[in-house]
Image (cartoon, rainbow, N blue to C red):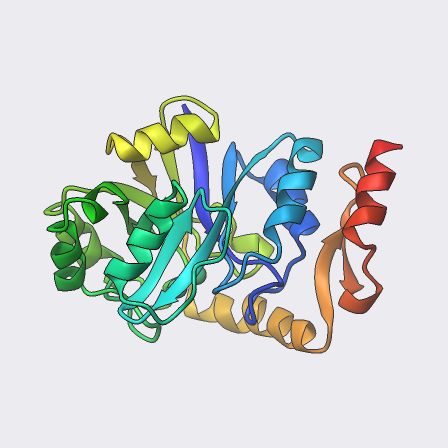
Amino acid sequence: MGFADLHIHSMYSYDGTASISAILKYVADFTDLNVIAITDHDSMEGVPEALDLAPYYNLEVIPGCEVSSKDGHVLCLFIERPIPPGLSLLETVLMVGNQGGICIAAHPMAKGVKSLRFETIRQVLKHPVASKILVGVEAFNGGLVYTRGNLSVQQESNSLPLAQLGNSDAHILQMIGQGASYYHGYTSADLKNAIINRTTIPRKGNGLSGSAVLTSYIPRFVLRKLGWVSWNESPEKPIIYAQINKLASIDTLTHYLHS
Ligand SMILES: [Zn+2]
Ligand SMILES: [Zn+2]
């Protein structure tokens, strides 16, 4: 049995607070996750670094992106190139299919963020091609401040022919894994099969309470705006805060790890 968290934001999201290396270090040391996806808002800037560094942390990373479709946020996974924001859900899903990827409806009906409506998801599932690409729904999202929203989403998700996933939607390290999915196997290929076969099982985490937003997220968000992020120099070193403009480039870091 493997565990995956397929909705994690890095510093390449305007609201993310951790470097890719810090995310990998946190996942390796403080969670039981086998596979993660880096899903920044409309950006795949962190993906090459994540794919390069993941083996050093004994992890597998799925290349992904949280695309702001016109109809709401959608997780696009196993893709190679960014998908433009602002398209309809159907157009977005078909573009992901052209790259051999799959889509998961992120936090449907969530308040405060642009989220898919269940009617829109059902409409797209009537399309014979799109229904083979949009194969999952986030039945649990750990990042929702309105956590009660997860209950109605879970009920509504039961009526959809989709794999149900739990994800953290982490914007800080401490949230990673607070929402995950069980699946048969361990690898990202096993996970893709499990999603397509609708056999994943959401695992609920503690979510982000209102007070955690105040005490954990906001201070880190302010630091991020001042140019400081969680960072990890190499797998055997601890996570520290570092200034973005002084971070070792990926070339330097990869070279260090190889030496
Ligand atoms: Zn979102
Ligand atoms: Zn998100």
Residue at position x 29%, y 72% in the image: 111
Residue at position x 59%, y 58% in the image: 10
User: Where is the N terminus found, in terms of image quarters?
Assistant: top left
Q: Quadrant of residue 151?
A: bottom left
Residue at position x 79%, y 36% in the image: 236
**Residue 4's spot in the image, x, y percent?**
44, 38
Height in image: 200 above or below 10? above
**Quarter of the displayed picture in which ligand 2 can be seen:** bottom left
Q: Is residue 257 left or right of residue 181?
A: right
Height in image: 142 above or below 144? above
Q: Is residue 215 left or right of residue 49?
A: left
Extreme residue toward the right, this view: 259
**Residue 227's spot in the image, x, y percent?**
73, 73
Of the pair 71 and 112, the residue shown nearer to us: 71
Q: Is residue 188 left or right of residue 241?
A: left
Q: Quadrant of residue 190?
A: top left
**Residue 47's spot in the image, x, y percent?**
59, 50
Of the pair 48 and 163, the residue shown nearer to us: 48
Q: Is residue 113 left or right of residue 20?
A: left
Height in image: 218 above or below 121? below
Residue at position x 43%, y 28% in the image: 189
